Amino acid sequence: MPKLARLSAKKLIQKLKQIGFVETHQRGSHLYLKNEENTKIVTIPVHGSKDIPIGTLYNIVVKQAGLSIEEFNNL
């Protein structure tokens, strides 16, 4: 099974924007992105330049965005 590399929130947002996610709003330190094609909403914690923990990253990529780990790593 492929592994996820640790990323900062900034890099994660860049990768998700490549596949069609757009910023909708921000509430505190959480940024919300929406994909217009399949109406998926993703919540990303933005805490400066800190890397997102692997469990949180997995939840965002696989469960919220609906991508496989291989698809995400190929972006």
Image: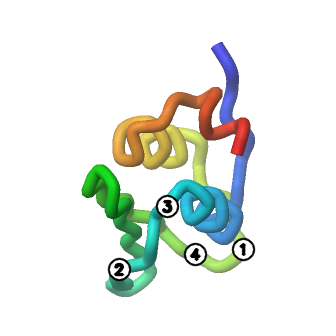
Which one is closest to the eye, mark 2 or mark 4? Answer: 2
The residue tagged 2 is 24
Question: For the residue labelled by badge 3, is the local secondary structure a helix, a strand or a loop?
Answer: loop
Closer to the N terminus: mark 2 or mark 4?
2
Which is closer to the viewer, label 3 or label 4? 3
Q: Which mark is residue 17?
A: none
| Residue identifier under label 1 | 49
Instruction: Residue 6: give x, y in percent of width and height.
Output: 71, 47
- The first of marks 3 and 4 along the sequence is 3
Q: Residues within 10 Å of mark 3 (few under 14, many from 20)?
A: few
Residue 35 spot, x, y in % from top left: 37, 60
The residue tagged 4 is: 47
Q: Residue furthest front?
A: 37
What colouring does the structure picture have?
A: rainbow
What is the C-alpha distance between the residues marked 3 and 2? 12 Å
| Residue at point 72%, 37% (across, down) | 74
- Name the amino acid type tagged 4: His
